[in-house]
């Protein structure tokens, strides 16, 4: 592949157009011209309006809500580029939808994350660039290279300024998030605590207990995504009862569906720090407790290095 950016083509789907534009400004390349709209019956229409023959194409699209529409847009865009003779197509998915359905937890249920991986590969992707996968093993669902970036450098930079060397405890909302929380705690020289979560059904938590000391500490809840915010706000209330002096939360993907904003506003959370991997809804934009950090430079640098066939491993920490 060429070492310059002459053959680099960056396109954005509807779900991530502002982020795609910001990434293009970082790379100093124009955003590719494409029409992505719907026919009157709801079918997705895609038309690429510039030559991509022999190009190194990056398609930026999170499969967030409406997940099915955004996934179909991504698949059709990649099929269009493949049929237009692009040399390489990279699906840039800041948020990988259906990632929570990554194994059979009950009889007769699909492994949706694997099906989405197969669809992306079949549509023409040569590689995938994503961020903060819900579970790392999803990389193994693909038979093409997958780079899983982390929003940690962006979040840590902000937390160091925001917390200003206060006594901090990083809190994992469940056992599965402990490695992530431990890595954050190490880089912030902070303590570690774990929430023992008992879930009765999907998106419903019955009770929550704290393993570790948080009394008098600034508690920072850390998760990969916040959906209905039920777990997050219950954890914040438990931390308040345990004597935490201040309570913050961080996540990469602000899904914020259902009554999430009301729960956050009613909770003892001082601030929820999120990335722009998923665009905020109008209601979420009006929430004063939410602080949005941009990951455009992180993803843009990964795109540059991928295009130039350079290592991206230094971006994973």
Image (spheres, rainbow, N blue to C red):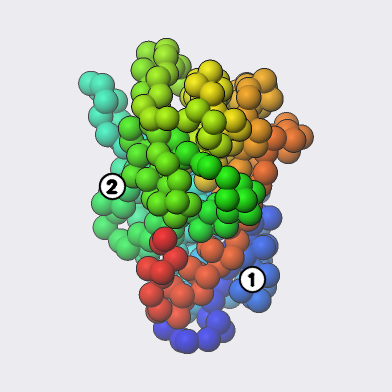
Residue shown at the point (40%, 79%) measured from the top left: 309
Residue 49: quarter of image? bottom right
Task: Indicate left or right for 281 with 186 as reference.
Answer: right
Could you tell whether 257 is left or right of 212 in the image? right
In the figure, 13 relative to 300: above or below?
Answer: above
In the rendered image, the residue lying farthest to the bottom is: 3
Between residue 306 and residue 231, name the one nearer to us.
231
Q: Which residue is mark 2?
A: 137
Residue name at image x 37 percent, y 68 percent: 313
Residue 128 picture location, percent across and down:
40, 59
> Which residue is located at x 47 percent, y 87 percent?
3
Name the N-terminal-most of marks 2 and 1. Answer: 1
- Looking at the rendering, in which quadrant would you find the N terminus? bottom left
Is residue 221 placed above or below 201 in the rendered structure?
below
Mark 1 — residue?
26
One can see residue 194 in this view: yes
Element type where label 2 sits in the image: helix
Assign the C terminus to one quadrant of the image.
bottom left
Residues marked 2 and 1 touching at CB (< 8 Å): no
Count of picture labels: 2
* Residues packed near mark 2 inside 10 Å, few (<14), some (14 to 19) or many (20 plus): few
For marks 2 and 1, give the CA distance.
Answer: 30 Å
Please, what secondary structure does the residue beneath circle 1 have? helix
Locate residue 277, reporting x and y percent.
57, 49
Q: Nearer the viewer, residue 178 or 231?
A: 178
Q: Is residue 44 above or below residue 193?
A: below
Q: Residue at x 54, y 31 (%)?
A: 216
x and y percentages locating residue 246 in the rendered image = 61, 32
Q: Is residue 39 visible?
A: no
x, y (%) of residue 168? 51, 41
In the rendered view, tell whether residue 136 sits above or below residue 234.
Answer: below
């Amino acid at each position: 592949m060429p070492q310059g950016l002459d053959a680099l083509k960056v396109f954005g789907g509807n779900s991530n157009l502002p982020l795609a534009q910001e990434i293009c400004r970082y790379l100093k390349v124009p955003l590719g011209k494409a029409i992505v709209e719907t026919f009157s019956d709801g079918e997705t229409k895609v038309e690429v309006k510039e030559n991509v023959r022999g190009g190194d194409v990056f398609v930026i699209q999170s499969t967030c809500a409406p997940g099915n529409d955004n996934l179909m847009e991504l698949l059709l865009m990649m099929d269009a580029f493949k049929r237009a003779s692009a040399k390489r197509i990279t699906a840039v998915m800041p948020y990988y939808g259906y990632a929570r359905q990554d194994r059979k937890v009950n009889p007769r249920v699909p492994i949706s994350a694997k099906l989405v991986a197969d669809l992306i590969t079949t549509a023409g992707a040569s590689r995938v660039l994503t961020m903060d996968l819900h579970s790392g093993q999803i990389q193994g669902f693909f038979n093409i290279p997958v780079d899983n970036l982390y929003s940690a450098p962006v979040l840590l930079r902000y937390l160091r300024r925001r917390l200003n060397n206060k006594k901090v405890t990083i809190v994992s909302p469940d056992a599965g998030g402990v490695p992530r929380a431990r890595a954050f705690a190490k880089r912030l020289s902070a303590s570690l605590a774990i929430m023992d979560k008992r879930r009765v059904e999907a998106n419903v938590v019955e009770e929550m207990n704290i393993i570790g000391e948080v009394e008098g500490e600034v508690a920072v809840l850390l998760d990969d995504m916040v959906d209905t915010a039920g777990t997050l706000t219950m954890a914040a209330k438990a931390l308040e009862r345990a004597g935490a002096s201040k309570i913050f939360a961080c996540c990469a993907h602000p899904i914020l569906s259902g009554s999430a904003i009301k729960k956050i506003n009613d909770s003892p959370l001082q601030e929820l720090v999120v990335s722009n991997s998923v665009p905020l809804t109008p209601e979420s934009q009006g929430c004063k407790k939410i602080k949005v950090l941009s990951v455009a430079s992180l993803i843009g640098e990964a795109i540059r290095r991928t295009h130039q066939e350079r290592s991206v491993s230094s971006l994973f920490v």
